[in-house]
Image (cartoon, coloured by chain):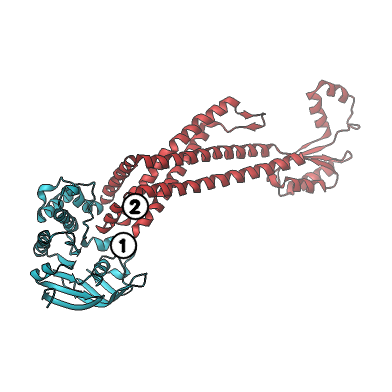
Chain colours: A red, B cyan
Amino acid sequence: MKFFRMLRRSIRDSFKSVFRNFSLSLASISCITITLIIVAVSILITFNVQNFTREMEKDLTIVVFLEGDTTEEEVKTIKEKLETMSNVESLTYQSKAAVKEEMSKENEIFNEVMSSWSDENNPLKDTFQVKVKVVERISNTAKKIERLDKVSSVKYGEGMVDNLIEAFEAAKKVSYGMVIALILVTVFLIINTIKLTIFSRKREISIMRLVGASNFTIKTPFIIEGMILGILGAIIPILIVCFGYIALYNHFDGYLYSKMITLIEPEPFIYMVSGIVLVIGIIVGMIGSSSAVRKYLKV
Amino acid sequence: MDLIRVKNVNKQYKNGVTAIYDLSLNIKKGSFVFVIGGSGSGKSTFIKMLYREEKPTSGEIYVGGINVAKLRNSKVYKLRRKLGIVFQDYRLLPKLTVYENVAFTMESIGATKSETRRKVLKALELVGLKGKIHNYPDQLSGGEQQRVAIARAIVNEPRILLCDEPTGNLDPDRSMEIVKVLEEINKTCGTTIIMATHDKEIVNKMQKEIILLKDGRLIKHLEKGGYEE
């Protein structure tokens, strides 16, 4: 009962303080707003890059070409060997006859040329299509497969894939680093702005200590004040996330440049990002204000 | 059992100044004690150590069973709820009315509204300011402001009232009024009162227990006495 009474008083006091020192509060709020906008954009980019990478990774396959004179028995042993490799997720076999059929369906000219090929003089090769578990290790796996008997060559779009993977990794790291750095800067700025509001109430805090208020009682209004600042500061970034991302998604029709780069669908995604932004705002406000008030609790 | 026990206390400030040398004394429940001595005698340091604004460098201080010397910063409020403190400069909040200033104590410790109201009015009646509860501190005289501060200090019915030069800013007549109020509190509520002062006239007139300090050392501790004997 007493706890709730104190809590109600704390909430009332913190709202009073936010609006009484509105110019200072506005400084904190706009500072949080700017940071959270950048944080939100970073999160949108990071998640999209991750999504895109995952989609790409799903499509990545190693194509294994076998020598022309491979017997059915040898195909079986190669299949067994591939299946035991640790990084192999799944594989499908296509005999040269199947390849021929597929290709002849695709194009009429092909069809005409290929119709003269019999099973014996078919110049195409038997292939395995291998999907890997860990894309970062794709080049190692490819090399291992290449060393197997009767494998003539292995293709997985070497240079391009390697570069893409590296670029995505770098992009991920940079955006994580940026988000963390921005959050730290905001915490620092909030500590300083809230210190100013607290400074004007120094006397009040010291008298509270003298008449027997516990540190918890003194701190709580300031922490709630920080949370309120965080929530108010998160409003504009959340609006930007919601409307901005939907507009962007509709403008590009869900794709960037080509069908290869798809954007994440906005429906549950923007709510999740808004939630993250709000939570970051609240936590940053709380940390900022509680470390700002600590200094005055030593009288 | 003595309410306050001080044993072999030394206090040296960080800048090297030693304010208290080997101080040992006991104060009984319900006493009215004057702590007297000139400037720099250590009166203020002594009072500050009792409510733990300062920690002793060595020695023990027990106030109402609490070991003040070892009290952690986060637990200080437990001590302060047993104490009322009055300062020379009143330390009222200028934006609050007389009533709100006194109620501030009760609110800070989480009392209910009805309890707050009852105790605040009682305390203001005791100091004779019931008619001015809606005034702001700057509308009151110095003596009245100090009486508000006393009301704030006693509203939670503490066992001990510490006063650090409460009459330092007042003329002799107002000073006497304040001391009379303190005596009234001492008699009616049984509150132990410890008052640091250098006002010889008051001490001589009142003839109460005195603790005389000089250069940080205890010179005299008498059950009844004046400034110079």
Q: Residue at x 75, y 46 (%)?
A: A139
Residue B102 tag number: none
Task: Tell which residue pokes out farthest to the right in this image.
Answer: A121
Q: Chain of mark 1?
A: B
Q: Residue at x 63, y 42 (%)?
A: A171
Can residue B1 be seen in the rendering of this structure? Answer: no
With respect to residue A230, does B215 lie above or below? below
Name the residue type under label 1: Lys
Q: Dot 2 lies on which element?
A: helix
Q: Residue at x 29, y 64 (%)?
A: B53
**B166 or B121: nearer the eye?**
B166
Res B63 → quadrant: bottom left
Can residue A69 be seen in the rendering of this structure? Answer: yes
Query: How far is mark 1 from mark 2, CA to CA?
Result: 14 Å
Q: Is residue A228 left or right of residue A174?
A: left
Name the residue type under label 2: Lys
**Residue A3, position as x, y percentages in the image:** 28, 51
**Residue A76, position as x, y percentages in the image:** 80, 43
Where, quadrant-wise, is the C terminus of chain A in this rendering?
Answer: bottom left
**A197 or B61: nearer the eye?**
A197
Q: Is residue A231 left or right of residue A125?
A: left
Q: Residue at x 75, y 48 (%)?
A: A140
**Residue B26, position as x, y percentages in the image:** 20, 75
**B9 or B40: nearer the eye?**
B40
Q: Which residue is mark 1?
A: B75
Q: Chain of mark 2?
A: A
Residue A219 tag number: 2
